[in-house]
Amino acid sequence: MVNKKLFLLSFLIMSIFFVVFSQEIITAERYLEMVSEKYANMRDFEANISIQSNGSNMAGTISYLVPYFLRIDFTAPAEQTVVFTGDMLTLYLPDYRATLTQEVNSGRSSAAGQGLRILRRNYTPSYVTGPAPVLLEGTAESVVRLRLTRRSSSESFREIILSINPDTKLIRRMDGTTLAGALIRFDFSAIKINQGIPEQRFIYDSPASANMYNNFLFRNTD
């Protein structure tokens, strides 16, 4: 009888170990790679965005189209706009009635997923609390949280925490800590991908009353 119980107990323990170790163990490095693959396969992306930094709050709608088109239409500050076409960066600042432009030599190569590939190259990923989803602060959503720690002192952010939807593998929040210890938070909500965003969305005509400042960052010599 005792031997029979020992046999059943041993069988149960072996079964548990078989189930546990037969499952794929997803490392933080592999998880970040999966997220990067998700973004690399996107054609377009649209979401509500909010930015918190140094006590200030900004909000708007962000649009992205492969390979490099980006536009943010802000509702706070109202009418503020950022547009990047791969060749030209345009910023409209309504408080100053100013439109700032900068020519850029992009090389015309695809930038899809490039941002996350750069993070994978320059930062070391780890789980904040483990691979299990946890509640995202201030919401009822569950996310997987990855901590990215810089590999070299040349990076602008000392640490970046990504909060990722475990089902869609889309980034819901990014918390970046600068070298000075300041926190910059980007929240993305109402995310839509592959909706057929046209290039025409990235055509921007600044108000006629705006003062124009060309090549405000540096002069393009190429």
Image: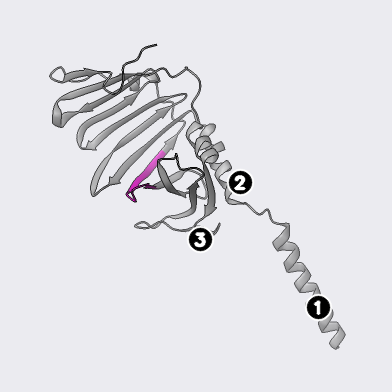
Q: Return the residue at label 2.
A: 30
Q: Residue 193: x percent and y percent?
A: 45, 34
Label 2 sits on a secondary structure element that is helix
Q: Residues within 10 Å of mark 1 (few under 14, many from 20)?
A: few
Relative vertical location of residue 207 with respect to residue 15 in this rendering, above or below: above
Residue highlighted by disc 3: 129
Q: Point out the tag, 3 or 2, that comes first from the N-terminus.
A: 2
Please identify, in this view, whether the residue under mark 1 or under mark 3 is nearer the observer: 3
**Is residue 112 toward the left or the right of residue 30 in the image?**
left
Q: Which residue is mark 1?
A: 8
Of the 4 image quadrants, the one containing the C terminus is top left
Residue 174 is inside the magenta segment: no
Label located before the other in sequence (1 or 2): 1
**Badge 3 element:** loop
Q: Give the amino acid at mark 2.
A: Arg
Going from the N terminus, do you reach mark 1 or mark 3 first? 1
Is mark 1 in CB contact (under 8 Å) with mark 2?
no
Q: Amino acid at mark 1?
A: Leu
- Asked if the residue under mark 3 is in contact with the one under mark 1, i.e. CB atoms within 8 Å, the reply is no
Chain part drawn in magenta: 176-191
Determine the residue positioned at 28% across, 46% down: 53
The number of numbered badges drawn on the structure is 3
Of 29 and 167, which appears nearest the observer? 29
Front residue of 40/149: it is 149
Q: Dividing the picture into quarters, in which one does residue 100 lie? A: top left
In the orientation shown, which residue stands out farthest toward the top? 222
- Asked if 77 appears above or below 138 in the picture, the reply is above
Q: Say what secondary structure mark 1 lies in.
A: helix
Residue shown at 14%/32% (left/top)?
Answer: 95
